[in-house]
Image (tube, helix red, strand yellow):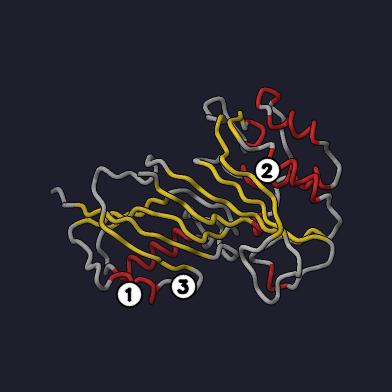
Amino acid sequence: MQYKRFYYLIQLQYLGFRYHGWQKQPDVLTIEHMLNKTLNYVLEGKRFKVIAAGRTDAMVSVNQTYAELFIYEDELNLDTFLEVFNKNLPQDIKCLSIEETTADFNIIQHPKVKEYLYFFCIKEKMHPFCAPFMVNLQEDLDIALMKKGAKLFEGEHDFYSFAFRPNPETQTEGKIDVCELTENSIYTANFFPELSYVLKVVGEGFKRQQIRLMMGALIDLGRHKISLEDLKKIIDGKNKMKLEHIAQASGLILNRVSLKP
């Protein structure tokens, strides 16, 4: 027997600090697990499936992203679903909106632009309340040099060295529209350091841990462990270098996912 299927696009945001990433895994807490658990309760056991616009790693937070929700047999009451869903989700996950879509829409294949932010501070130890949002590097870094290095990532490159464990089939060529390091004025709190920094990266697609590998290279640049010329060589994919420095996950936020028309 074939059941009718209904299609919905939901917007989500979550604090990733206590989760082991998006993807459901045995014996650990994940975003997908909590969504499925809540949906199973709210939908009273009806069949459903959720597919994310992209998976996040452990401790990575999301300000706004999309997921596709398939429901079998019965359609949602959109007038009441959002309120009930949010009431039953844990406090560190929120559904921003939901709208009906069609069978032709595919959240994975649909073209989209992603904006990532990586927050960090240097020198003095930060307030412990900052831990879910930024990384504390208790050393002096050459920020001016790191700003120059960040701009080198912009444009079309073969990002082979910034792809985590690539295999021969991995597509490593891509384009970064914006990569800039600035003083942070995007997210603020009274317990944040007086001065913090943010790396903003915008592009259509990124490989697993790519932003954290990029940030790791910029930190090494700020420590003068590598030079701007070294960074240029690393960005040139034909050199196929294996990078060891993956920046901590807790400073990374998927800030925005924009769906292209």
Whether residue 129 is situated above or below residue 248 in the rendered picture = below
For the residue marked with disc 3, what is the amino acid?
Pro
Mark 1 surroundings within 10 Å by alpha-carbon count, few (fewer than 14), some (14 through 19), many (20 or more):
few
Mark 3 surroundings within 10 Å by alpha-carbon count, few (fewer than 14), some (14 through 19), many (20 or more):
few
For the residue marked with disc 2, what is the amino acid?
Leu
Whether residue 227 is situated above or below residue 70 in the rendered picture = above
Residue at figure coordinates x 26%, y 69% from the top left: 44
Rounded to the nearest angstrom, the CA distance separating label 2 from label 3 is: 31 Å
Circles 1 and 2: CB atoms closer than 8 Å: no
Whether residue 102 is situated above or below residue 119 in the rendered picture = above
Please give left or right for residue 62 compared with residue 230 in the image: left
Total marks placed: 3
Question: Which one is nearer the viewer's eye here, 110 or 28?
Answer: 110
Rounded to the nearest angstrom, the CA distance separating label 3 from label 1 is: 12 Å
Residue at figure coordinates x 74%, y 31% from the top left: 232
Residue 3 drawn at (x, y percent): 16, 52
* Between marks 2 and 3 in the image, the one whose residue lies nearer the viewer: 2
Please give left or right for residue 1 compared with residue 133 in the image: left
Residue at figure coordinates x 36%, y 54% from the top left: 50
Residue 171 drawn at (x, y percent): 53, 29
Residue at figure coordinates x 40%, y 60% from the top left: 11
Q: Secondary structure at mark 2?
A: helix
Reading the image, the residue beneath label 3 is 90
Question: Which one is nearer the viewer's eye here, 153 or 237?
Answer: 153
Rounded to the nearest angstrom, the CA distance separating label 1 from label 2 is: 39 Å
Residue 233 drawn at (x, y percent): 74, 28
Q: Which mark is residue 84?
A: 1
Residue furthest to the top in view is: 238
Reading the image, the residue beneath label 2 is 213
Question: Which one is nearer the viewer's eye here, 112 or 106?
Answer: 112
Residue 186 drawn at (x, y percent): 61, 63
Q: Earlier in the sequence, mark 3 or mark 1?
A: 1
